Amino acid sequence: MGKGKLVTVTGIPGAGKSFMIKHLLKSDLGFEYLLSATTRNKREHEINGVDAYFMNVNEFLYLEHNNEFETVDNIFGNYYGIFKNDIQKLDKAINLIKEFVFRNPGDIKSVFPYKFSTYILPINLKVAIEELGKRQTPEEEKRNRLDYIFSQWAWIKKDENKQAFDAVHINNYDEQSVVSFRNLIKKEIEKVM
């Protein structure tokens, strides 16, 4: 039995990462979403155990202390972790998809060697900022994310930084963007079959 592939989707807030992932999960490519445990507040539309494993800081730190996580990160003041049991699905030839906040693609690849990293780049910055404004996010977190948008926008616009990812996909917030993203992922999955 071969290994499953982990596809990571990275990009600035509001770039359409979740939108692309939801469409990919509904496709015929057979992906499962790799959930994170997080101390972030649950958004109104989110469901515990479906969108993430929401928990308080003490619960998270207890699990971390007991070595339950494959990776742990602190993003915008909230803890995130991926359970070891969940990542072991790759050993059963199950393809997983996960949204990641950018840190260092090389670090992720060292933990997950069967990873295909994508960066979703919005067609323009204005749309991404409008998308961020629609979220019910505390104002301080929203300001932090806005700062992050501007720093990441400047960073990813440099060609040498785009090379840190296996693919950069432009999101025009339309059906064609969804189809081309699916085709990009399908081509990659077919390489490992």
Image (spheres, rainbow, N blue to C red):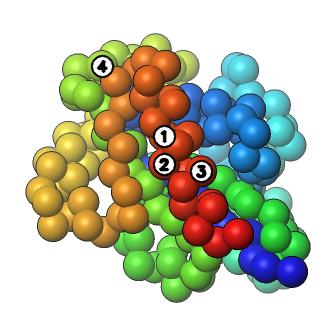
Task: Tell me the element at label 4.
Answer: helix
Q: CB under 8 Å between callouts 2 and 3?
A: yes
Mark 1 or mark 4: which comes first in sequence?
A: 4
Q: What residue type is labelled 4?
A: Val
* Place of residue 126 in the rendered image (x, y in percent of width and height, measured from the top left): 23, 20
Q: Nearer the viewer, residue 38 or 128?
A: 128
Residue at mark 3 to residue at mark 1: CA–CA distance:
9 Å
Question: Left of 52 or right of it: where is 160?
Answer: left
Q: In which quarter of the image is residue 103?
A: bottom left
Q: Do the residues labelled 1 and 2 touch (CB within 8 Å)?
A: yes
Marks 1,4: beta carbons within 8 A: no
Residue tagged 2? 184
User: For the residues marked 2 and 3, what is the alpha-carbon distance in whole angstroms?
Assistant: 6 Å
Camera sees residue 116: yes
- 137 and 28: which is toward the camera: 28
Using the numbered discs, state the Cα–Cα distance from disc 1 to disc 2 in whole angstroms. Answer: 5 Å
Q: Where is residue 88 in the image (x, y as percent from the top left)?
A: 82, 75
Eye-nearest disc, 3 or 4: 3
Residue ID for mark 4: 127
Residue at label 3? 186
Within the image, what quadrant is residue 89 found in?
bottom right
Give the amino acid at mark 2: Leu
Nearest to the eye among marks 4 and 2: give it: 2
Q: Is mark 3 on a helix, strand or loop?
A: helix
Front position in the image: 86 or 27: 27
Q: How far apart are marks 3 and 4 (CA)?
A: 27 Å
For the residues labelled 4 and 2, the Cα–Cα distance comes to: 23 Å
* Residue at left offset 61%, top offset 76%: 114
Hey, what amino acid is under mark 1? Answer: Phe
Name the residue carrying label 1: 181
